[in-house]
Image (tube, rainbow, N blue to C red):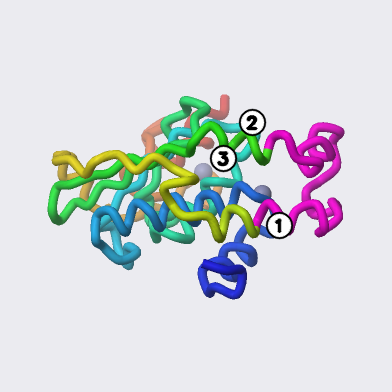
Amino acid sequence: MDTNNELYKAGLLLHGHKCPAMPMGLRAGGAALEALGVPRAMDGQLVSMVEIDSDHCATCYADGIQMATGCTFGKGNIQKLGYGKFALTVVDRKTGRSVRVVTRPETIKRSQESEFIQCRKKGVPASQIDAALVDPLVDFIMNTPTNDLFVVEPVKETKLGPGRPHDFNTIICSECGEVAVERYARVKNGKIVCMPCAEKA
Ligand SMILES: [Zn+2]
Ligand SMILES: [Zn+2]
């Protein structure tokens, strides 16, 4: 996969800056789909569980995963497990199978020892770092064979619950006049209100 790849270009557009972690997510997501033998999720047939948390290095990884797998925040079929780890599990609801893809320590170390990360540690935003420092890291991630970057664990059987049915009913809050999904409505002094209005004194 080179950087002329459609998914890389779209990933870059979504993500905003060039960095090694977004492509790392692209490759990890792609490896998971390949292991399961499934295409990107057009709907909610795949579920991704990403082991990153927030406010730590390489969380950009999750944007690459959304791009590669089609498991997105908007469709609600991606979750963060919050372990601060660079691993991903993709579950195929249809066949009840899953695969976990773990980034090899050497893959992370290569980025962490780079000048790019030294700049990031000094607080330079990724978009302002010289492309000459980023491009080799991106090329490495995009062009190295999957098994050199990641450990792809054996595919196994996984049963997920059916998930909550989509709620299409809405209310209009009697205080702020804004729309909210019905199950989030509250009753305050006999009137239907949204959650923030219910919490106001
Ligand atoms: Zn990034
Ligand atoms: Zn309200």
Can you identify the residue that label 3 sits on? 107
Looking at the rendered image, the disc whose residue lies closer to the viewer, 1 or 3, is 3
Label 2 crowding class (10 Å Cα cut-off): few <14, some 14-19, many 20+? few
Q: x, y (%) of residue 93?
A: 19, 51
Q: Is residue 16 above or below residue 48?
A: below
**Label 1 beta carbon within 8 A of ligand 1:** yes
Does the magenta portion include 123? Answer: yes
Secondary structure state at the residue bearing disc 2? loop
Gap between marks 1 and 3 measured at Cα: 17 Å
| Cα–Cα span, label 2 and label 1 | 17 Å
Query: Is mark 1 in CB contact (under 8 Å) with mark 3?
Result: no
Q: Secondary structure at mark 1?
A: loop
The three-letter amino acid code for the residue at tag 2 is: His
Give left or right: position of 195 versus 114.
left
Task: Name the residue beneath numbered marker 1.
Answer: 18
Foreground residue among 170 and 58: 58
Q: Amino acid at mark 1?
A: Lys
